[in-house]
Amino acid sequence: MAVPKSKISRMKRGNRRSTDALVAPAYVEDKESGELRRPHHIDLKTGKYRGRQILEAKDDF
C-alpha cells in the first residue's frame, strides 16, 4: 500500500489542485466580421485565421 513519506502542506496541495478549476471559455470579437470567436481559432463564418483565408467562407447564414 502506498504511504506518504511526509505530510503535504495545504499550500502545496492547493497549488496542485489550482489547475482543476472550471473556467468559462473566452471569446473575442473578430476585427473584420464583428462576430464572437474563440482566440487562436479559425473564424468559421469567414474562414479566416490571422488575416489569411484558410477555409471557404460559409454562405448559408
Image: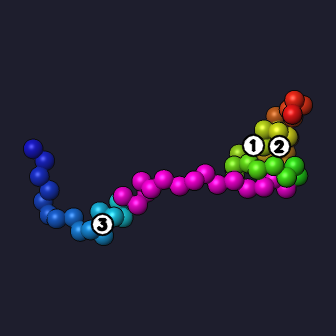
Residue at 27% x, 68% y is: 10
Task: Give the Cα separation between the discs numbered 2 and 1.
Answer: 6 Å
Amino acid type for the residue under numbered disc 3: Lys
Q: Please determine whether, in this image, residue 9 is positioned above or below residue 54.
A: below
Q: SS class of the residue under badge 2?
A: strand
Q: SS class of the residue under badge 3?
A: helix
Residue at 29% x, 62% y is: 13
Residue 15 location, x and y as percent?
36, 64
Chain part drawn in magenta: 17-31
Amino acid type for the residue under numbered disc 2: Lys
Sequence-earlier tag: 2 or 3: 3
Residue 42 is labelled as: 1
Quadrant where the N terminus is found in the figure: top left
The residue furthest top is: 60
Report if the CB atoms under discs 2 and 1 are less than 8 Å apart: yes
Amino acid type for the residue under numbered disc 1: Ile
Q: Is residue 6 magenta?
A: no
Q: What residue did someone put label 2 on?
A: 48
Residue 12 is labelled as: 3
